[in-house]
Each structure stands twice: as structure tokens, then as C-alpha cells.
Image: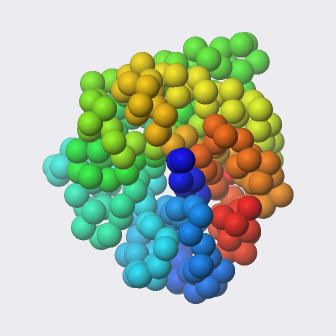
Amino acid sequence: MRKKLIAANWKMFKTPDETRDFFREFLPLVSDHERDEILVCPSFVNLPAAVEAAKGSNVAIGAQDMHWEKQGAFTGETSAGMLLAVGCTHVIVGHSERRQYFGETDDIVNFKLKAALEAGLTPIACVGEVLEEREAGLTEDVLRRQCLRAFHAISAKKAAKLVVAYEPVWAIGTGKTATPQLASDAHLLIRGEAAKAFGEEFAGQLRILYGGSVKPENAKALMAEAEIDGALVGGASLDPKSFAAIVKY
Ligand code: PGA
């Protein structure tokens, strides 16, 4: 059985004080929750406050991005080693907003994945088609290409901690959720690509999260799908009650 991972992607929201306020309210709501793993990914400046607030709890802290080099003259960037040093265990890689607004390519996603795995972080590699691609019947091609390139030259042994998130871009922040069936089909395809890259056994254990307008109202139906191993939640993760309700779907 794959233990589900319910992850919050806070994007560019909240200050350190607001981060502490969130955890003060959120932790008691989920303190006895063992069924799923819980993860919160705030912006870089909120990581120390989040790690401190979540210390000793059942909530892990991750970053939303990282650079693939260990250090160097890369203004504005943060390395895997820096994330580990402040207490992060996870990192989101290749989110569609990074791809859309910051020019992140499949190759960059691959460099980041390799570096995160090498450093011992658990990367959540995001893939997903935009609306035009879905409407043109290109979803399968896009997912295949994104997976193939993201997994390039990574061994099954190295990939052990890998998590993938299927996030159809048309469902992110739009209130339009993929139906459980549609998400499930995409997850099957991604699992197939993982089997090609890393072998059947690995693919059987790989956790594939769904992301895109996950809310307390739709979480149960999505999580009931055997193919869906958790959620990556944006907007609805900013409120402690709402995120707790999703965790407890
Ligand atoms: P959303 O974002 O839940 O606000 O749609 C999901 C994501 O981008 O990870």
C-alpha cells in the first residue's frame, strides 16, 4: 500500500507571522492523523518559521523550488544543501507556474530532480498539460515527454524518494477540477512512464499526487481512486481549517 501524501503549496502567500499563526491553528487539528503524510511548502523566507513551528509534529516542511548547483554565483537562488540545513525534507520541482512564468524547461526540471535526489531531499516532480494541449488531444504526448525528460539519466536506486504530481494546468487555481476518472487515467500513463524509466516494481511503489483545485468538497472522491496517492493543494491549503479538512478527507 502506498501511503498518501497530502501537500500544501502556499506559493507566494503569507509572512513568517502568518506562517506561525497557521501552524498554531493547524497542528491541533491534525495531531492525531496517521493515515497520510502531511507536508507544507511555504516560500523560502517562511521556511525557518515553518520548521520551528512544526518541530516534533507529524507535519513535514518543504520548499517550492531549488537550484541544481550546490553553490555559486546564482543570484536569487537557493540550493538543496541550504534547504536541508534549515530543516526541509521535501522540495517541489517543475511546478507549472515555474514552467509558464519563469521559463523552466524539461531539462531544468531534470537537473533539479537529480540534484534534489542526490542531496537526499524528497522531490515532488510536477507534470501536466495546458488547456490547448488537452483540447488538441495532446495530453498523453505531453505527459510522456515531460516524464521521459524529467526522469532522464536517473537510476531507480537514486530515484527511490521520488514523488510525482499530476497537475493539469487548466485545473490550477481555476476551480475546475479534473474528474477522478480523468486524473486516474493520467496517473496510469505516468506510472507507465515510470515503469519504463525505473522498472515495474519501482512504478508500483511510486506515489503520484493529483493537484488542481483540490478542496475539502472534492478531496474524498479524488482520494478514493486507487491511482491517486495524495494531493498537492494550492489555494485551499492557505486556511488551516480547509487544509485540515482535506488532510482528513
Ligand atoms: P490550486 O493549486 O489548488 O490552487 O489549484 C494547485 C497547485 O498549483 O499546486
Depicted 196 relative to depicted 241: above or below? above
Instruction: Quadrant for the C terminus, please.
Output: bottom right
Left or right: 5 as drawn, with respect to 45: right
Q: How is the image coloured?
A: rainbow
Left or right: 132 as drawn, with respect to 106: right
Between 37 and 154, the residue placed more toward the observer is: 37
Q: Is residue 231 visible?
A: yes
Between 183 and 160, the residue placed more toward the observer is: 160
Residue at x 58%, y 86% (from the top left corner):
24
Residue at x 68%, y 71% (from the top left corner):
244
Residue at x 66%, y 64% (from the top left corner):
247
Left or right: 159 as drawn, with respect to 37: left
The answer to which image quadrant residue 180 occupies is top right
**At which x and y percent is residue 168?**
66, 34
**At which x and y percent is residue 8?**
58, 60
Q: Residue furthest right?
A: 217
Residue at x 59%, y 23% (from the top left corner):
189
**At which x and y percent is residue 177?**
78, 42
